[in-house]
Image (cartoon, helix red, strand yellow):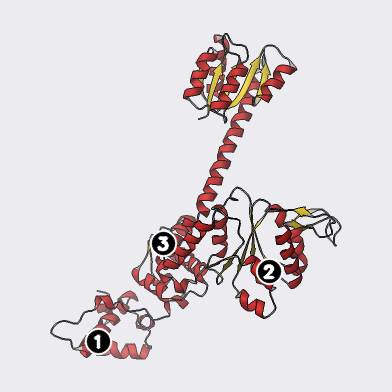
Amino acid sequence: MSTILVIDDEKSIRDMLAIMLKRQGYHVSLAEDGKTAINAINRNVFDLVISDIRLPDINGIEILKHSKTVSPETDFILITAFASQETAVEAVKNGASDYIYKPFDIDDLKIKVQKCISKKRLERENIFLKRSVERQMQFENIIGSSPKMQMIFDLIRKISGTNTTILITGESGTGKELVAKAIHYNSLRKDGSFVSINCGAMPDSLLESELFGHVKGAFTGAVLNKKGLFEVADRGTLLLDEIGEMNQGMQIKLLRALQEKRIRPVGGTEEIPVDVRLLAATNQDLQKAVESGKVREDLFYRINVIAIHIPPLRERKEDIRLLAEHFLKKYSTAIGNKAAKVSPEALKYMENYDWPGNVRELENAIERAIALSTSELITQEGLPEKVTHLPQPLDTTLFRIPERGLDLEGHLEQLRKEALIEALRRCNGVQKEAAKLVRMSFRSFRYYAKKYQLTKAMALR
């Protein structure tokens, strides 16, 4: 509920405004003179103050000045019975949002009050959204507890106070753009824009215009002037993803822009100064690209001031559990499914798989499993076949040879029998399905089922 302080030495006006504002849904406080008003402003934070200019002790302009000192965010509407341009100018100069003259129109005052309160709510929403985005982009929200990821977190902390150009490398799907955003939102430029472009997805003929902008008539279809991404990212951060796909001509123009900190729009004659921090990302080995002549050596050294390499998921499998839990929570909420956790068996399959598509592939697998799940548990049946077709590693930590020794052949025979019974149980006694589950041919399964005298009724018990 928005809070409003009404200041007027006339009781009838105070009471009338209190009734009107309370009916509008506001919380209202009253003050009959300047001293009472200043005490109230010192003790509380009001969204809006409505004050008469002429009061018995302190005038409304002085109260406005005091309020802007102790509570700059509080809006002010001043009321005066003596309409003059000088009074209005003084009120606005000292920070008043609006002013009205006595006798005032109630409907006009309602509109002015609503305008001030709506503006205040919008400011609060913008602050909330900005802080929410910043929290989401903090590097702590990049999932990973492995030593390699912790080293990346430490490096981001160290470079947060610099404007150094950074090259982010890693396979597709490892999260290069997420790391770039974390660098931006932990930097001195976090209040500026973060802008990204995939150089590999943009035709060479359009990339220059996208980066540097163009003027009207520069080429067919250029009917208006257009700002480039360097201008859009001014005082912020620009990420050039897949920078290794940029042709030689564009590499020269990019190098010049980085060195001179100035750009020239396509078709333009004047250069525009820009203040941009550049981040570059690639899934290529740029050193080899330099040796082959695909990437200019001078550009490579210009962007490779600090390098951050994001390891593939297969090299940090200890992070798979954390990532799975994160995506489980994310998509359970989005899809409306009650899936709460991944079964131990499914997790072992995921940890045994190499994930060539890295984090992006794992995320897609979890989303798919949740969409297909009908229970609160994600099992291996919900995972893609390419994940589960690999042999599941045995948990050897649970196996111990007894002190008296072990009949290995007999033990393996018993394990086979129990595995077939469990497979039949899961497949409701259907031998063909059970054979697939344990990676056996139907003929072999049927042989052992007959040998162990396994029946459908036994499996369903």
SS for callout 3: helix
Q: Nearer the viewer, mark 3 or mark 2?
A: 2
Image-quadrant location for residue 80: top right
Q: Position of residue 74 (x, y in %)?
A: 57, 28
User: Residue beneath label 2, please?
Assistant: 299
State the CA–CA distance, disc 3 to disc 1: 35 Å
- The image quadrant of residue 303 is bottom right
Q: Nearer the viewer, residue 348 or 285?
A: 285
Residue 262 position in % (x across, y down): 75, 56
Q: Are the residues at dot 3 and dot 2 in contact (C-beta closer than 8 Å)?
A: no
Q: Please give the name of the residue rendered at 50% of the width and 72% of the height, measured from the top-left corner.
A: 312
Amino acid found under the numbered disc labelled 1:
Leu
Q: CA distance from mark 3 to mark 2?
A: 40 Å
**Relative to 71, is 352 on the left or the right?**
left
Mark in front: 2 vs 1: 2
Q: Amino acid at mark 3?
A: Glu
Please tell me which residue lies in front, 458 or 225: 225
Q: Earlier in the sequence, mark 3 or mark 1?
A: 3
Which residue is identified by label 1? 412
Q: Which residue is mark 3?
A: 325
